[in-house]
Amino acid sequence: MQQPAAKRRFNNFLFSILLILGLLLVAELTAAGALSFLKKWKGIEYSPLPEARLSDSQREIIRRMLAGEEGHIRYHPRMGWVPNPATTKTGFRCNTQGFRAAAAVVDAQPAADRLRVATFGDSFTFGHGVTYPDTWQALLERQRPEWEVLNFGVSGYAQDQAYWRYRYEGRDYHPRIVIFGFNSENVFRNLNVFRPFYSPQTEFPLTKPRFLELDGQLTELPNPFQQLEDYRLLLNKPAATIRRLGEHDFYYHQLYRSGGWDHLAMVRYLKLVGYQLSGAQHPDMLFLKDNIFNVDSEGYRLATAVIDRFVDAVREEGAIPVILILPTGKDLARKAAGEPKQYLRFAQHWEKQQYHVLDLNDLIYNDRINVRDPAYYTEDGHNSGRMHALMAGHIARYLSEDVLPRYE
């Protein structure tokens, strides 16, 4: 018996709806699989800039910070953040003054019979995830008992923050030797104001000061959040606050943005593929030419000016500045593959300026270790205690034999 026309139309309509839903489900599952493949095998991950709000985990970190429940870092109005003396987290502990040292409290004036060394930089200087006794600074003290080594490194720092930490805190301890820990990746951080714009998945949803290059001169932009309570704006008025923080942030103006439909894998996939097919380069790559820092790029010029200023500030205090090129798994792998140093132009500039520079990538590679051996690195890619031990020996010899004799 033939179905009534109305029922046939309804069945056809229902079939069309189910077919569309089925196709959408297949597209969603395919997109989810493609995103997983790209992340696992190609190292390409959907990482949009926050447009309207931060992730739930980042918002929770801010809530805890506002409630006084800080982790291994705490808010600082000038530098953005500093180590938290109260942390009990293994591998992140520091003394009551907020830096790593053998003494719980360090006198501002060094003892007459000890040479004070102070180190500044990011997590590779701090010794991220490594217990204090296993850091190269502590090992340096054990190899040279007549030295006292203070570690002012801070996880997540840019080179400008390392400079300001010396100016605002480090120089008050009157070190004789001041070491600037150089890590190529930090060059990119100098153009950043709000950490999630640079690293969208970061556990540091924090602001920082930065320098702008105006008419060939460095102009400081202070930390946009001058008091801890300012972070409440990211919870109460996220969209407007994020736009304001992005005004002077290089990365805010480069990458694709998060959106209200991002819960759908196919939307995330289409945005990611569209970005890749557009021929756009990741912002970091804009500073490189043939995988070497381009001297004409803003990243190179800014980093060079900041480090030059650091050297000048140390010399003004009558101390000895030393640039320490820290070993990283990526730089050592490049060397093992016969590739040029990404930081080559920096090294050439420092040689021309006759700075004291120690390239640990060269020395550690010449130790003939297996640079891909995971024993030399922590799970998150930082240097392990085993690498720190190699570093300490080279640094001790360089300072003792090449640097200090010039000032005796």
Image: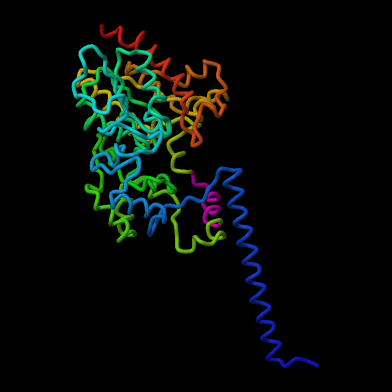
Determine if the magenta segment contains residue 227: no
Task: Give the percent coordinates (x, y) of residue 347.
Answer: 40, 22
Q: Quadrant of residue 191?
A: top left
Identify the residue shown where x is 45% and y is 60%: 259
Quadrant where the N terminus is found in the figure: bottom right
Identify the residue shown where x is 39% and y is 52%: 58
Task: Give the percent coordinates (x, y) of residue 207.
Answer: 31, 46
**72 left or right of 312 in image:** right
Task: Give the percent coordinates (x, y) of residue 195.
Answer: 37, 45
User: Which residue is most to the right?
Assistant: 1
- Colour scheme in use: rainbow
**235 left or right of 167 in image:** right
Judge whether 300 appears above or below 402 on screen.
below
Q: Quadrant of residue 180?
A: top left
Magenta region, residue range: 270-281
Quadrant where the C terminus is found in the figure: top left
Judge whether 354 appears above or below 235 on screen.
above
Judge whether 270 appears above or below 211 on screen.
below
Task: Give the percent coordinates (x, y) of residue 263.
Answer: 51, 61
From the viewer's side, name the closer residue of 90 and 56: 90
Most frequent secondary structure within the magenta stretch: helix
Determine if the magenta segment contains residue 274: yes
Identify the residue shown where x is 37% and y is 18%: 140
